[in-house]
Amino acid sequence: MDTELEKSIKEAVKVIGRREFSKFEIKEFLLKKGFAHQIIDETIDYLILKKWYNETKSAIELAEGKARKGFYGPEYITKFLSDKQYPQEIAREAVLSVFKDDEYEYFLAGKTANEKFRRLKRKFIEMNENRYKIRSTLVNHLMSRGFSEKICEDVADKIIDTETC
C-alpha cells in the first residue's frame, strides 16, 4: 500500500474516531492536510470497504444525538445534516430513523417546552393575563428548535391548560 494512502487512512481513522463526519467533511479535512484528491477518494473507498465508515450510520448517530441531547425536532436536524453536507436522501433516512412516529417528537417538544415554560413563568407572574403571550412564546421557541407546527401548538396548549387549571 502507498505510504501517502497509509497516512491518509491513519488521519481519516483518527478524525472519524472522535465524532461522526460526512464524506464531504472527511474529504475537506484530508484536503487541508495536503492529500491529493485521488488519495482521498481511495481512502474513503478503503474505509467503506473495511466497514470502518458508513455515511448513513454516521448521519443516524448525529441525528439521534442532536434529538436526545439538544431536544431538537426533525426540521432542525434535517437542516443540521444538510449543513454538514450529508446527501438529502441520507439526511431524510436518518431523521425518519429517529422520528419513526409523532410520539417521540411530542416527547422531545414537551421536555423542551416545559423547560422554557419554567423560565417564562418567572417572567410572567400573572399567568392568566399573559396566557396568549406565553403560548405564543412557547410555540415560537419550539418551532425554532425544528418541531412541526401542529406539535408545537398542541404541546403549548397542553402546558398552558395544565398550568391554569
Image: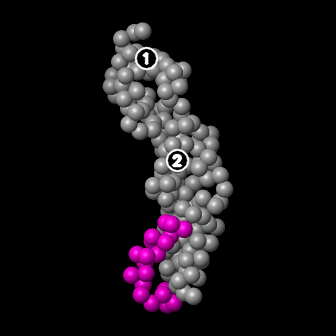
- Disc 2 versus disc 1: distance between alpha carbons? 29 Å
State whether residue 121 appears in this view: yes
The residue shown at (51%, 90%) is: 128
For the residues carrying marks 2 and 1, which lies nearer the camera in this image?
Answer: 2
In this view, the residue farthest toward the left is 33
Q: Residues within 10 Å of mark 1 (few under 14, many from 20)?
A: many
Q: Which residue is mark 2?
A: 63
Foreground pick, 133 / 69: 69
State whether residue 86 appears in this view: no
Left or right of 12 on screen, residue 131: right
Q: Can residue 56 be found in the magenta stretch?
A: no
* Quadrant in the rendering for residue 13: top left
Numbered circle sitting on residue 39: 1
Q: What secondary structure do most residues of the magenta stretch adopt?
A: helix
The residue shown at (65%, 52%) is: 100
Q: Secondary structure at mark 1?
A: helix
Q: Which color scheme did the rendering employ for the protein?
A: one colour
Q: Which region shows up in magenta?
A: 110-130
The residue shown at (61%, 53%) is: 99
Instruction: Name the spot of residue 152 as percent of width and height, x first.
Output: 58, 68
Give the answer, above or below, for where 165 lies relative to 23.
below
Q: Amino acid at mark 2?
A: Ala
